[in-house]
Amino acid sequence: MRNARDRDAQHPVGNRGAESRVAEAMRAEDNADASAKAQRALDLAASIATRGKKLDAALLLLAQEAEGFEEDLAELNMSGFTHPSLANFKAIVERPFFAALMIQPSGKRKGNGQPADGTLKLRHLPPGERMTFSEIAEGYALAIRRSASVALGDKAEAA
């Protein structure tokens, strides 16, 4: 060990040159890593911007369909069919939102095996209150078909 120290002491320039090359190599590696991270950040920025546009489009479509649903129910109610009512729809319309946003749609799970909370979770609904728009609409359609069948005298369809 003493011989190595003596040698380094005798050739300090050679030792500093090696240290300089090592430091330069480390800087180059850090720069390459930083560049790769910056490029990935640019890719993610593009993905985030695209997802924002898709979320806005999905919300617009949701709002347009809800408006159409409301118009259909209002027309139905004005024509004398009182069930399902627009008031009932407005009373339960939040349930599909809360139910859909409660858990991760990808099926991700927590460490304890339970479903992971959804990114946009607003409120937890007990199982008996969870419903989808399809379930609401199918229930309403069934009630309308039954009422219309009775009005038309079709007893088989009304059952």
Image: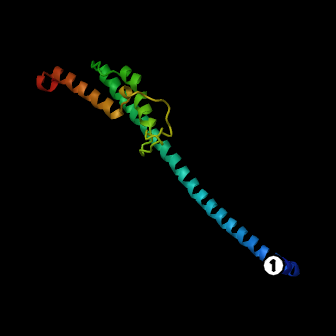
Q: Position of residue 72 (x, y in %)?
A: 33, 28
Q: Secondary structure at mark 1?
A: helix
- Compared with 152, 3 (above or below) is below
- Compared with 18, 31 (above or below) is above
Q: Quadrant of residue 12?
A: bottom right
Q: Residue at x 45, y 35 (%)?
A: 102
Q: Residue at x 38, y 20 (%)?
A: 87
Q: Which residue is mark 1?
A: 4
In front here: 124 or 52? Answer: 124
In front here: 112 or 130? Answer: 112
Q: Position of residue 46 (x, y in %)?
A: 56, 55
In front here: 3 or 86? Answer: 3
Q: Position of residue 149 (x, y in %)?
A: 17, 24
Q: Position of residue 73 (x, y in %)?
A: 33, 25
Q: Callout 1 environment at 10 Å: few (<14), some (14 to 19), or many (20+)?
A: few
Position of 158 with respect to 87 (left or right) is left
Q: Residue at x 86, y 79 (%)?
A: 6
Quarter of the picture holding the C terminus: top left
Q: Quadrant of residue 35?
A: bottom right
Q: Quadrant of residue 94?
A: top left
Query: What's the amino acid at mark 1?
Result: Ala
* Display colour scheme: rainbow
In front here: 103 or 152? Answer: 103
| Count of marks overlaid on the render | 1
Residue lying farthest to the right in this orientation: 10
Q: Residue at x 62, y 60 (%)?
A: 37
Quarter of the picture holding the N terminus: bottom right
